[in-house]
Image (spheres, grey):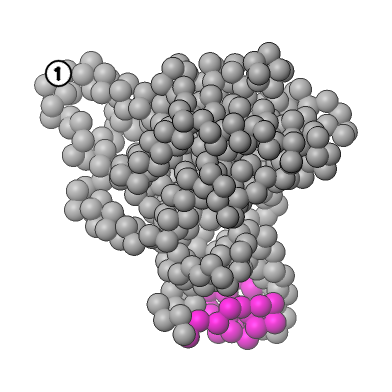
Amino acid sequence: MDAASFEALNAETLGPRLGGLEALRARLGDDPSAWRVREVGDGNLNLVFIVDGDKGSVIVKQALPYVRLVGESWPLPLKRSFFEYHTLARQAARAPGQVPEIFHFDEQQALIVMEFLSPHVILRRALIDGRMLPRIADDLALFMARTLFRGSDLSMQTRERKADLALFADNVELCDITENLVFSDPYFDAEMNSHTSPQLDGLVAQLRADRDLKVAAQRMKHIFAARAETLVHGDLHTGSIMVTETDTRVIDPEFAYYGPMAFDVGMLFANFWMSYFSQSGHEQEGNRDAMRAYLLDVQERCWNGFVAEFSRLWRTERNGILYQKSLFEEQGDHLGAEQALGEVLREIWVDLLGFAGIEIHRRILGLAHNADFETIEDPDMRAQCEAKALKFGRQIAVNRAHLNGMKEANALAALIETGAVA
């Protein structure tokens, strides 16, 4: 990709620049001058446009050669759009109907034209608004189980899997962002850190002096960097999921790489737990007890659904080089295969708790924060909500091997929320 020939789009130039693409004309109309373009990107990295025409609408997403949240002082390669495109293609095959359809990819200009999801909204916004969506637990359980299992040596043929591993190994810069901003920076006074509530200063100092917590964070970083088990989304949170009452789609996998099975699951669950702890700050229009109960139920149903689908795939699609059926089922040892499955799922459970705890900390103490807390206007209430989340994050990261299932983890969250555990 030649950065010198790259030109960032804007609302005025998009039509003239892309008007010759048949993929757009077929979906928008033949007259680009009649297209209506709105820039809607509010993320940390990219330009995002909605383009409306007489025939329909599309999304155009273009990478920038820097981190948009920070500016040109933090350069970032355009090739991340390449990894996003290839990840979406693989996710579409492994979890059909759960990612947006891709209509066009321009590697030189680092842009992807994709399906406009409507009337979908960002899941994080829906949860802030108190919406109890009925499908997210089941849909996300299936998405994670299918993409993580089918992208691994449990399922893929060795040559194809190793070729993919080599391809995605070049997503170095985005991995570097995660390795530093998630696992290291929150635990010392890094330059780009910030927390919005001075009331947290004492707790922040306590966490940064917590040797057990720092060791846990570095252990999770070690696993993130060294355990290339499957193709992970790499940034699976409630801001990268779009929803309606009847549909759930996962977007924005530009951080994709080959990493640990538990990473996506832990990142997602961290965001559900943060939503849970933020609910007290969104009670201006009424009590949120029902919403809190709903979020804990989503966690439990999602984990149980993940286990069920992962187990089904283990029994029906385990055709890779790991835990080969020739060693177990074909020898009449079905119990051995089930024992191995239990050990794999237990390792995923323990690791996801570690990743979730660290993700909670970085979203409150690091560079990129969550709207769950940021939209709480009362600084004292915001600090109370964030403090509970920080304490919970510490507990699940450090004690991850001692929490036996989602019921126990959710019970701990409820105790911290009510103040029964300081």
In this view, the residue in front, 330 or 252, is: 252
- Horizontal and vertical percent for residue 177? 47, 55
- Horizontal and vertical percent for residue 6? 50, 81
**The disc labelled 1 sits on which kind of residue?**
Gly
Relative to 153, say whether 106 is above or below: below
Quadrant of residue 153 in the image? top left
For this view, does 228 lie left or right of residue 64? left
Looking at the rendering, the stretch of residues picked out in magenta corresponds to 5-28
Whether residue 351 appears in this view of the structure is yes
Dot 1: within a 10 Å radius of its alpha carbon, few (fewer than 14), some, or many (20 or more) residues? few
Residue that numbered label 1 is attached to: 332
In this view, the residue in front, 289 or 243, is: 289
Q: Does the magenta stretch include residue 23?
A: yes
Whether residue 140 appears in this view of the structure is no
- Horizontal and vertical percent for residue 349? 42, 27
Relative to 295, say whether 92 is above or below: below
Q: Quadrant of the C terminus?
A: top right
Residue found 28% across the figure and 54% down from its top: 165
Q: Name, please, the residue furthest toward the right.
A: 285
- Horizontal and vertical percent for residue 178? 47, 50
In this view, the residue in front, 191 or 271, is: 191
Quadrant of residue 284 in the image? top right
Q: Is residue 66 magenta?
A: no
Residue found 59% across the figure and 18% down from its top: 412
Q: Name, please, the residue furthest toward the top.
A: 420
